[in-house]
Image (spheres, grey):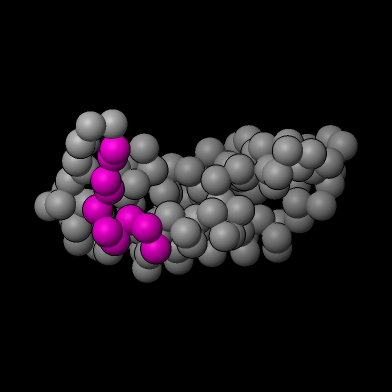
Amino acid sequence: MEYCAPEREANFLLFELFRVQDIWPNIAGFDEFTQDLVEAIIGEAARLSAEVLTPTNQIGDQEGCTWDKGDVTTPAAFKGAFAELTAGGWLGLAGNPEYGGQGMPKMLACLVEEMFWSSNTSLCL
């Protein structure tokens, strides 16, 4: 299975359709999200989706999760993929930085989360 995140479409939506480069600089906390930074975030999310999450998708379907007397066991391949998500701060993209989040605009976080869910829904659950 292959997954190619729609980077071009994401950038089109943000910068041509919604013109966030004209909006975000006027919102406290979002002024640092320049087009170069946002494109880098989208590019890295696309890479992570294709190279880390997608390869574990079919494995997750084959192995499944198990429930045994209150203990849940996930597919072995999920551990490394989830570790990369957490190490990179990808789980709290739009979260408040005071509580460990990245403070990104929700619009950007939604695009990234859509890539992750599309590449491996089971892991993202």
Q: Is residue 78 covered in magenta?
A: yes
Q: Residue furthest left?
A: 62
Quarter of the image containing the C terminus?
top left
Residue 105 in picture, x, y percent from top left: 68, 39
Judging depth in this view, the residue of 7 and 75 nearest the camera is: 75
Judging depth in this view, the residue of 80 and 121 nearest the camera is: 80
51 lies above or below 116: below
Horizontal side, residue 90 vs residue 9: left or right: right
Could you tell me which residue is drawn at 47 percent across and 50 percent down?
A: 9
Labels in figure, total: 0
Residue 68 in picture, x, y percent from top left: 20, 36
Horizontal side, residue 75 vs residue 33: left or right: left
Residue 20 in picture, x, y percent from top left: 71, 42
Residue 110 in picture, x, y percent from top left: 53, 38
Judging depth in this view, the residue of 23 and 125 nearest the camera is: 125
Quarter of the image containing the N terminus?
bottom left
Q: Report whether residue 11 is seen.
A: no
44 lies above or below 74: below
Q: Is residue 108 covered in magenta?
A: no
Could you tell me which residue is drawn at 76 percent across and 42 percent down?
A: 97
Horizontal side, residue 46 vs residue 122: left or right: right
Q: Report whether residue 70 is seen.
A: yes
Could you tell me which residue is drawn at 84 percent across and 35 percent down?
A: 27
Which contiguous range is marked in magenta? Answer: 71-80
Q: Residue furthest front?
A: 69
Image quadrant in which you'd find residue 19: top right
Could you tell me which residue is drawn at 27 percent across and 46 percent down?
A: 73
Judging depth in this view, the residue of 23 and 93 nearest the camera is: 93
